[in-house]
């Protein structure tokens, strides 16, 4: 494979991942910022709290996402936005791994499908087995 | 105690420095939070989230400018992610006081190795078979020097083992271990400094995600601590990512060295007082 092939081949992957990460990060930051503003609205201050309601508890990452999406509207608005922002932020590296597998699969680059799949499987197991 | 706005401003500065040096930010933010009176485990847990924010925030810029090498990143991540799981297991088994000294020793190694890399990038004369098979090569446009830099990676097996060690440290210490990864990229794999920083930023998010669930589901993640950190670090990291291509390597190295020295002093202090 020549230098040019490597450059042009990776270009699409880079652009795809780039946009995905930008969207994920921007949405996450906006949600967190809304959460902080709402927190100020309800509490009248921006002190960092040690109240148990601001701590997250869950079993594994996927169970945590399912639980949060099922209980979205039961929580305080500030906590709700902060939690959603956190979930989206945590999903960015995970989605990055998935995108890489898909891209190399489309490229029929078996070497890198294997490599990226290995990373994705280990990442998934580490998130699921807690 | 800090309030959310002050923490947000501190996090912007940390995100900027973290993304410029490939350190990831948590190794700086965690001690600041402990200094401000927060429980250490809570600080570590939120620090892992800061790593993800730094990584995704800055990698989006690097990837767009095509400095990060994704093949190199994904190949190395195989080793780092396994290392992180091994490291987290070791931490469960040893006394916490060892962690401070290990942290300091870990940073000291990077300080010794980086001195010689002030020189201009010279590609390796020969690329080994595995690196060639993996297609570890690329090029990027260097704005500071106004030219396209072509590079080749070599010693990929040794580099992979180095990244396994980096992963162990990341899992044990709850940091991105970006400093050590940058050294492996430059010294073993022989890729240019900027590619190394960008590639390191690209993978620390995935490594941190593998580690963060341990802390997250122990009920240690404080949303009012995490939210301003995530916002601040992301803003800082995006700004840092935009600045990276305009800073000469030498300035980057000096900034890197200063931070490493401060972190060594800080961890030795913590270790001695914990004895």
Image: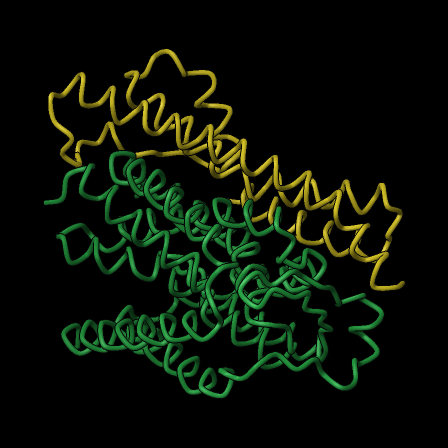
Chain colours: A yellow, B green
Residue A10 lies, in percent from the top left, at 76, 50
The quadrant of the rendering that contains the N terminus of chain B is top left
Q: Give left or right: position of A3 versus B153.
A: right
**Residue drawn at x 17%, y 31% as measured from the top left:** A51
Vertical relation: B210 (above or below) B97: above
Vertical relation: B227 (above or below) B131: above
B41 or A47: which is nearer to us? Answer: A47
Q: Quadrant of residue B177?
A: bottom left
**Residue drawn at x 19%, y 56% as measured from the top left:** B34
Q: Quadrant of residue A53?
A: top left
Q: Quadrant of residue B78?
A: bottom right
Residue A46 lies, in percent from the top left, at 16, 30
Residue A31 lies, in percent from the top left, at 39, 25
Vertical relation: B47 (above or below) A55: below
Residue B221 lies, in percent from the top left, at 32, 41
B109 or A115: which is nearer to us? Answer: B109
A23 or A32: which is nearer to us? Answer: A23
Q: Residue furthest front?
A: B146
A42 or B165: which is nearer to us? Answer: A42
The quadrant of the rendering that contains the C terminus of chain B is bottom left
**Residue drawn at x 69%, y 40% as measured from the top left:** A99
């Amino acid at each position: 494979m020549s230098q040019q092939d490597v450059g042009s081949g990776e270009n699409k992957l880079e652009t795809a991942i780039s946009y995905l990460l930008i969207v994920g990060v921007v949405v996450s930051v906006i949600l967190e910022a809304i959460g902080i503003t709402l927190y100020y609205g309800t509490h009248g201050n921006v002190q960092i709290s040690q109240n148990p309601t601001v701590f997250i508890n869950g079993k594994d990452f996927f169970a945590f996402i399912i639980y949060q999406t099922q209980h979205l509207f039961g929580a305080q608005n500030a906590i709700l936005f902060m939690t959603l922002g956190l979930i989206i932020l945590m999903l960015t590296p995970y989605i990055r791994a998935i995108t890489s597998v898909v891209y190399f699969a489309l490229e029929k680059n078996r070497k890198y499908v294997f490599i990226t799949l290995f990373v994705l499987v280990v990442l998934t197991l580490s998130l699921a087995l807690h | 105690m800090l309030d959310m706005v002050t923490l947000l401003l501190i996090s912007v500065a940390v995100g900027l420095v973290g993304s410029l040096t490939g350190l990831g930010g948590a190794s700086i933010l965690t001690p600041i939070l402990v200094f401000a009176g927060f429980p250490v485990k809570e600080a570590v847990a939120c620090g892992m989230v800061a790593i993800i924010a730094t990584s995704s925030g800055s990698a989006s810029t690097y990837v767009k400018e095509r400095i990060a090498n994704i093949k190199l990143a994904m190949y190395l991540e195989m080793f780092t992610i396994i290392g992180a799981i091994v490291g987290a297991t070791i931490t469960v088994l040893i006394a916490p006081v060892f962690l401070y000294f290990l942290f300091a020793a870990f940073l000291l190694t990077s300080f010794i190795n980086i001195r010689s890399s002030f020189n201009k990038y010279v590609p390796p004369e020969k690329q080994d078979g595995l690196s060639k098979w993996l297609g570890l090569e690329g090029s990027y446009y260097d704005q500071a020097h106004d030219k396209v830099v072509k590079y080749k990676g070599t010693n990929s097996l040794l580099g992979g083992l180095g990244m396994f060690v980096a992963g162990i440290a990341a899992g044990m210490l709850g940091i991105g271990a970006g400093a050590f990864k940058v050294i492996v990229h430059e010294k073993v794999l022989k890729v240019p400094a900027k590619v190394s920083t960008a590639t390191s930023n690209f993978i620390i998010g995935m490594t941190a995600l593998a580690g963060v669930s341990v802390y997250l589901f122990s009920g240690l993640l404080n949303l009012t601590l995490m939210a301003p950190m995530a916002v601040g670090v992301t803003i800082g990291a995006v700004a840092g990512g935009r600045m990276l291509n305009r800073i000469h390597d030498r300035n980057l190295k000096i900034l890197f060295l200063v931070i490493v020295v401060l972190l060594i002093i800080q961890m030795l202090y913590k270790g001695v007082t914990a004895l």
